[in-house]
Image: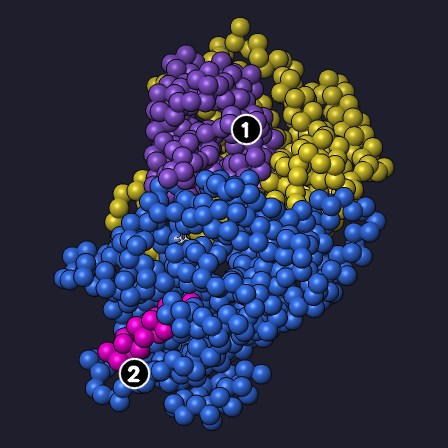
Chain colours: A blue, B purple, C yellow
Amino acid sequence: MTSITSVKNLRLKFPGESEMLFKDMSLSINRGEKVLLLGTSGCGKSTLLQVLSGLVPQTIDIPIKFDEIQIPDQWGFVFQDPDTQFCMPYVDEELAFVLENLQVPREEMSSKICSLLKEVGLELDNIHTPIQHLSGGMKQRLAIASVLALKPDVIFLDEPTAFIDEKGTEQIWETVKRIWKDKTLIIVEHKIEKIMDFADRLIVFTPGGEILADGNTSMVFTQYKEKIKEYGIWYPGAWDEYKFKRLAENKFEYQNTLKLQDFKGYRIKEIKIWADDMEVQSGEWITIIGENGAGKSSLLLAFMQLIKTSGNYFINDLLVKKIKDISGLVYLVFQNPEYQFLTHSVYDEITYGLQNQQNIEADAKEILSSLKLTSKINQHPYHLSVGQKRRLSVATAFLQKPTVLLLDEPTFGQDSINTFRILEWIEQERQKGTIILMVTHDQHITERFATRLWKVQNGKIVADRQLNNSCKVQKEMLNELII
Amino acid sequence: MQKGLKLTDILVTIVISIAFGILYKIWGPLYYAVKPFGLHIDQLIYGMWFMAATVAFLIIRKPGVALLAEIAASSGEFLMGSEFGLEVLLYGIIQGLFAEFILFAFRYKRFDLFVISLAAFSSCAGSLIMDFYKGYIGDLSTWNLTLFIVFRIIGSILFTGLFAISIAKALEATGVTNLVRSSSKEDHEALDQ
Amino acid sequence: MNSLFSGKYTWLHSINPSLKLLTIVGLFGFAINIHYLNFMLGFSCVILTLFIFGTGYSYKQLLLLSLPFLLVFLSTSSSMILFGKGETILFKWAYVQISEESLIRGIHLGFRALSFAMLGLIFALTTKPVRLFYSLMQQLKLPPKFAYSFMAAIRLIPIMVEEYQIIMNAQKIRGFEQKNNFLKRMQRIAIPLLSQSIRRAYRIAISMEAKRFQSNRKRTYYYEIGFSRNDLFFLCYFLVLLGLAYLLSIQYPLLPNTDVRSLSD
Ligand SMILES: Nc1ncnc2c1ncn2[C@@H]1O[C@H](COP(=O)(O)OP(=O)(O)OP(=O)(O)O)[C@@H](O)[C@H]1O
Ligand SMILES: Nc1ncnc2c1ncn2[C@@H]1O[C@H](COP(=O)(O)OP(=O)(O)OP(=O)(O)O)[C@@H](O)[C@H]1O
Ligand SMILES: [Mg+2]
Ligand SMILES: [Mg+2]
């Protein structure tokens, strides 16, 4: 077999850092292989994809050194963030941009665009649709279509489904499997369930950026299981082996309630979210599920009074009208962590506004070490890996000690160990009496941790179920709800 | 330094400028609102209009950026339907060119307050030349004209010099400037250990 | 922006954008050299007619859009009227002195600013940015890396506005003190907005290169922008009507025909 992309003795160090991210790392990938790269969050997977595609150092100026490097001639890259992949305003113009780069004659463009869209399952009534009007999953599919147009031999996929709902994730992987059956695929993904059987080679990295294991998927998972488990990388059955036992319910440190009466949230005068009468109490952990674009984030924004609302909304019998009424009581973790960063270092970020509290330093250090951010304490929040950014924004929430904690997909892009740690922190908060409202696409979390479930559809809470911990009944009910 | 601007440089410059373009669009009516009341008080905030050039240059630090930024900011403003119409585009080009001259004179190697203020002053001179030609400002009575010019110079140095430097400093602290600037030799050498 | 307001598609939309731009530049240069108030009035009328009947927007929209013009007109003319040089004094009070010359010059300036503003708006209202940049690449040989950067940046505008709101919200949640002085507050808003935009721009540039965008290579165009009969009509509109306006201003002047420049000499 011939190699199609490889690097020998790669060294890479970010400017101003003391440690190298890669030190003499070698890797070679053969034509036609479907490679899955696994590793803890922050071990350097995204960076490696950028090196293998030649984006580093040509476009992204990071100092690197190597003895040899082979970069594929024809490659495509699907990036993680659905919002920063496009340069044109409309769907057809974006694909045309790629075709223009390839000097496709103009007469052929329209039909090519249609067939590309069809191939990735993005059927639109009108191809001249603004990209802004697409949901996250549709945008990601458009990104795949533009990569498809490039006719690449090698495709790099960096967590293409991080923000996508369960159904969308499945569809995207189906598409990838169908259209790139005989191409070389290099995939980074934490949610391995849907893609594992497709990959024929698995490369596992240690947290230090070295290769721990490299080989056939089932071989790696059996031979290296202990190590993989120790590092906290996802493996098949990780959820089943995870033992979570909820302590018997005791008294809460404080009793809180949240009440809604005919509560509506608006965006540009349009009702985007609508809840009938609801009551939530201390000890409840509600997961909010629903498709991309259903209105889950809008619901949390409405609770935070960041969009216009009507109806009544009480916290501990206090009628909430303005954001001032709930400052210190309710705290929201945004879907995109970057929006929340205000300071220039991880430590400042987490202690922001709390400097005169007692023990703040010890608390901050404890949570940072538990979420594996200790070594990044002086780093700029924007210079973290995607998963690290998410953990930092979640960690900040815990130190705020709110009465109601709103979390928008707090575990996306996490390896197993960090997912569990985050969930355990949330559980700890819940036991103190904090009301937890959490948006998630991960069914395992709902099954194991939630005490109650809301399903949002077209902006309305269409289902409200109490959950107990007898998994079997629950699973059936969930499956039914999700479909 | 490789020749010409890379795509990343250009796109970043244009986006910075468009951000300023939006700001200008908000600023424009304010400018006209203060204009009739006082004795050229408006000229004090005129310097705002040259800011895109120096801010973009301070961030990217490459030749041509100042000119491009000024053109982009003004075309952004123009396309959004500026009250000034096409005039704003021509002013943009002249102001950008004048700032670029100064930066060129210092070989694009100096980023301190002195050089930036000089560039601000130069932009200001450019805009005044346009005004003499277009706005008949030479026909203002002398005391009024002096006031006009002095205020505009003060405003330019305040916004395009001082304020731009403070913005660039604050942006440096956010680490975003590392993205667009070339990595240093030391960083490359550190890989040999 | 075209998206804020939408009007009908008119013949002005179909004019080749490069040609439209150059024509407007030409008119601009021409107007700067008009020094007679009567002709200036005629010039403004020619443009006003096109603005009202050509752009395809309702009168209500146009009225709304032209409100700032009033301000432009008043403020541009006022300082010249109040403080300009002149001999035939009509009114004097402290430093304020209104002379006939400065009055005429002020009104002249006001009309000039008004026509420039209208010309600019005509262009902005009837030109899609994407078509403009495609045309600039094809007719005026603008290098693609500039053209596509502009188009990408324009796409980012609504995203930037949204981001601005999100940043404000995030700061509210974190209990950002609002007591700071004005300059500090401006920085608090400007810095995150700028740094986010720069990061976004940078990522988009990377993804453009990942889609194998190369500026120096030959490329095909999805929109091929050429010329049509409307372009000729557009040019003729100005040639004929401005000629007419000139004749009228000489034959039937509304005001005394003097050169506004030399009034004070
Ligand atoms: N600009 C930067 N400056 C300094 N350090 C950086 C920078 N960008 C990334 N890093 C660090 O490099 C490491 C690798 O980042 P990378 O994004 O490749 O991780 P990853 O394996 O993709 O993680 P994740 O699964 O969370 O996305 C991280 O520890 C991160 O903190
Ligand atoms: N800033 C905005 N202005 C107007 N409409 C918006 C805005 N943000 C989102 N929407 C619309 O509101 C609806 C709900 O969006 P929301 O972000 O709440 O969905 P979501 O359920 O969180 O989806 P996802 O799972 O993709 O995060 C969508 O139809 C979306 O198009
Ligand atoms: Mg990553
Ligand atoms: Mg959401």
**Residue A321's x, y, as percent?**
34, 69
Q: Residue at x 62, y 13 (%)?
A: C259
- Disc 1 with disc 2 on a shared chain: no
* Residue lying at the far top of the rendered structure: C265
> SS of the residue at dot 1?
loop
Please give the chain letter of the residue carrying mark 1.
B
Principal secondary structure, stretch drawn in magenta: helix
Determine if residue A16 is in view. yes
Q: Nearer the viewer, mark 1 or mark 2?
A: 1
Q: Considering only vertical position in the picture, is B101 above or below A402?
A: above
Q: Out of C265 and A346, give the one closest to the viewer.
A: A346
Q: Are marks 1 and 2 in contact (CB under 8 Å)?
A: no
Q: Quadrant of residue C231?
A: top right
Q: Residues within 10 Å of mark 2 (few under 14, many from 20)?
A: many
What amino acid does circle 2 point to? Gly
What amino acid does circle 1 point to? Gln
Q: Out of A315 and C159, give the one closest to the viewer.
A: C159
Region in magenta? A415-435
- Give the labeled residue for mark 1: B2
- Give the labeled residue for mark 2: A283
**Residue C19's x, y, as percent?**
74, 32
Q: Out of C95 and C213, give the one closest to the viewer.
A: C213
Is the residue marked 1 within 8 Å of ligand 1, measured from its CB? Answer: no
Q: Residue at x 26, y 88 (%)?
A: A249
